[in-house]
Amino acid sequence: MTADILLSPGAGRDGGTGHWAPGEQVLWRYRGNGSDAVHICRPVTVVRDDPELLAVWMAPGTECVKPVLADGSPIHHEPLETRYLRPRTTSVDRWWGAGVLKLARPEEPWSVWLFWEQGWRFKNWYVNLEEPRRRWSGGVDSEDHFLDIHVTPDRGWQWRDEDEFAQAQTAGLMTAATAERVREAGRRAVGVIGAWGRPFRDGWEHWRPNPAWPVPALPVDWDRPAR
């Protein structure tokens, strides 16, 4: 299966294999660090799901759940030194701009996101370091690990959010052992980038969503326990 094929919506599980069919709508969620509570939820459409890869599309205009400070102000407005110490809640907002294609290989401690400018001009890949995703009937759950890698179309790369990664350790959200495990995962991801391994070499930047796919709705029970 090549990355640039338009996949049509399907109904039900794919041939009884336990994988979702293209066109099914699921939830891509993140729990708070060290918590079972979901604080990020993004409804997405399945592009591909098999033993090698889960690929999902987050369409422009998707209603998502994101964390905010208890007074409703954006987290990134808070100084880094107190960003992880202030009380938080969640808020519902829409994803504006171009959509995002998310690619995740089973058991890999990162996912790779593709971003485009308006008009489908490819912008960059983004390696999001995270816990390997736990599948459940309604989607996948993970935990973000703060540190990320930005990858440009010319195959250049650089670390992102190293300051947040360090502050999360200072705030007690991540132990030294976990931080080293995340760093090691990042080094492995950099090795994949250097070798231009999958999914970078697979042509996903040429992929386009099926225009018949509707924008998934955010369910009322978006934070329901994974089963």
Image: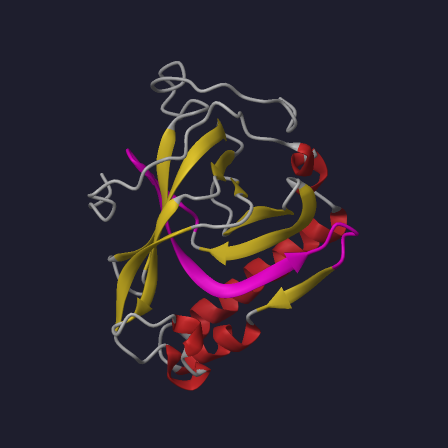
- Left or right of 162, for residue 80: left
The image position of residue 210, as x and y in percent, is 53, 25
Write down the quadrant of residue 140 in the picture: top left
- The residue that appears at 33% across and 63% down in the rendered structure is 67
Residue 126: in magenta span: no
Specify the quadrant that holds the C terminus: top left
- The residue that appears at 34% across and 72% down in the rendered structure is 73
Residue 142: in magenta span: yes
Magenta region, residue range? 132-156
The image position of residue 5, as x and y in percent, is 62, 22
Q: Residue furthest bottom?
A: 81
Write down the quadrant of residue 174 in the picture: bottom left
The image position of residue 58, as x and y in percent, is 47, 41
- Left or right of 4, for residue 11: left
Q: Residue furthest right?
A: 154
The image position of residue 187, as x and y in percent, is 63, 61
- The residue that appears at 56% across and 46% down in the rendered structure is 98
Give the tally of numbered discs: 0
